Amino acid sequence: MVPATDTRQRLIDSARELIYSRSYADVGVAAICEHAGVRKGSFYHFFPSKQELTLAVLDASFLEMKQQLLDRAFAPDRPPLARLERFLDMTWAFQKQMKEATGHMPGCPFGNLGAELSTRDETIRRKVDAVFSSLRSGMRDLLAEAVQAGDLEPVDIDATAAAMLAYFEGVLLTAKTRNDPDVLKQLAPAMLGIRIPPQAESA
Amino acid sequence: MVPATDTRQRLIDSARELIYSRSYADVGVAAICEHAGVRKGSFYHFFPSKQELTLAVLDASFLEMKQQLLDRAFAPDRPPLARLERFLDMTWAFQKQMKEATGHMPGCPFGNLGAELSTRDETIRRKVDAVFSSLRSGMRDLLAEAVQAGDLEPVDIDATAAAMLAYFEGVLLTAKTRNDPDVLKQLAPAMLGIRIPPQAESA
DNA sequence: GCTTGACTAGACCGACCGGTCAACTATACT
DNA sequence: AGTATAGTTGACCGGTCGGTCTAGTCAAGC
């Protein structure tokens, strides 16, 4: 059960890093192998295709994001909306650090793949969509807690969570296209003001 | 001055269509030529590189968008914010029609290229950024008019225009990743509620 | 010592990539 | 008619793509 080598994980990490900083199509299997210090034969021992590796990369990216960003930003040591602000601050810091290290703002690893591959690879599209769904679910919980605490007026929690995440993705894409992390500082806080009112049920 | 043939334009149109429905990397020069009914030699008579063609494609996409969408949606036959609603409705209708025709929601032609190429091609990134700047400028005018008319409370017009466009891009990307144009119907209207208040100058 | 099976090594495959080039044709001007 | 030039053609280039395959290494179980 325990893997005999770390080759598989090295391939995933290598691909995650390269694809995130470039793009799916721009990073070949050979480059992924070289960066991982692995020969091509080993690659296809662990993964049947570049596509399958990419699915594993999406899982790994989500795990990494959860551990490094979500679990910390959304730790319940402060009110829900303050956690959201911390999340935005941490995102800004990370993107800024990435730009200083690589010269480029990488944006969102999921949004990038969604934009590049959604029309070309249904399997990957669904996986990216699943990641977004998971994020949306977490955002729902947060908003529900905020409403509960009276920090947020009643809203359509489902729709508002989706809208906030969409805004976040859009801000990241805008900042990436301007290659300027400070776009996040300027625009991201407005995420907290987005509301989709509850659909009127009782007339 | 007047071109002797339409070959150049056919190449641009072909590339615009193919790249928009797939991606930059997924569409080769050979495919662009074939779809345009042009031989490869002619391609390189008109464009020194695929990159240069892509810059022309961005210009053409912007022109098309302006003529088919912006000029109609923002025609001053109704109040500013109502024009914005028309813009969102037209976008939804177009994306829905594209999905019915191709099976996929293509999203935003500029956002797609920005996400795919911003870290890899500085020239294209700048061009995409210029398109976004132009859109933002139009949005500023609209918001200014709305404030003037009293339909909108005073806001930071610059920042609010940027935020609204970012939200729009994010909604398009979310809908593309879900391959569901109706995401636009659900989320897009909240664009009208986004506000970034004026930075306090007079204390 | 022998077998097994996970893992590695790297040569190799056909297809395609973006791009080049020399030859050719059609048109326009003198 | 002659010439220049814009446009066209398709063969061709080296390189890279994702992926295959055979041979071999190595550690564990018997």
Image (cartoon, coloured by chain):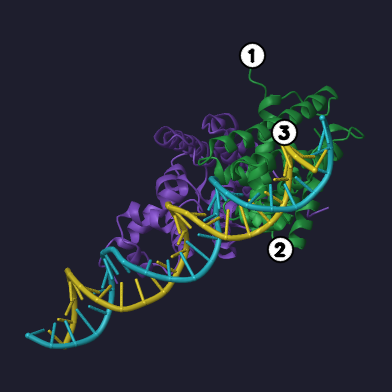
Chain colours: A green, B purple, C yellow, D cyan
Counting residues from the N terminus, which is met first, the one under dot 1 or under dot 3? 3
Image x and y of residue B50, in percent: 46, 62
Same chain for the residues under marks 2 and 1 in the image = yes
Counting other residues with Cα less than 10 Å from the Cα at mark 2, is it few (<14), some (14-19), or many (20 or more)? few
> Could you say which disc has been placed on residue A38 in the image?
none
Give the residue at mark 2.
A103
Name which residue lies at 69% across and 36% down: A164
**Left or right of B74 in this view: A172:** right
Figure check: B27 above or below B180 = below
Please tell me whether mark 3 sits on a helix, a strand or a loop. helix
Same chain for the residues under marks 1 and 3 in the image = yes
Give the residue at mark 3.
A135
Evaluate whether residue A177 shows in this view: yes
The disc labelled 3 sits on which kind of residue? Leu
Q: Are marks 1 and 3 in contact (CB under 8 Å)?
A: no
| Chain of residue at mark 1 | A
The disc labelled 1 sits on which kind of residue? Glu
Looking at the figure, which quarter contains the N terminus of chain A?
top right
Q: What is the residue that sits farthest to the top in this orientation?
A: A202
Looking at the figure, which quarter contains the C terminus of chain A?
top right
The disc labelled 2 sits on which kind of residue? Gly
Image x and y of residue A97, in percent: 79, 57
| Chain of residue at mark 3 | A
- CA separation, marks 2 and 1? 51 Å
Counting residues from the N terminus, which is met first, the one under dot 3 or under dot 2? 2
Image x and y of residue A183, in percent: 71, 54
In-front residue for pair A53/A148: A53
Give the residue at mark 1.
A201
Image x and y of residue B133, in percent: 57, 57
Evaluate whether residue B163 shows in this view: no
Name which residue lies at 53% across and 29% down: B182
Please tell me whether mark 1 sits on a helix, a strand or a loop. loop
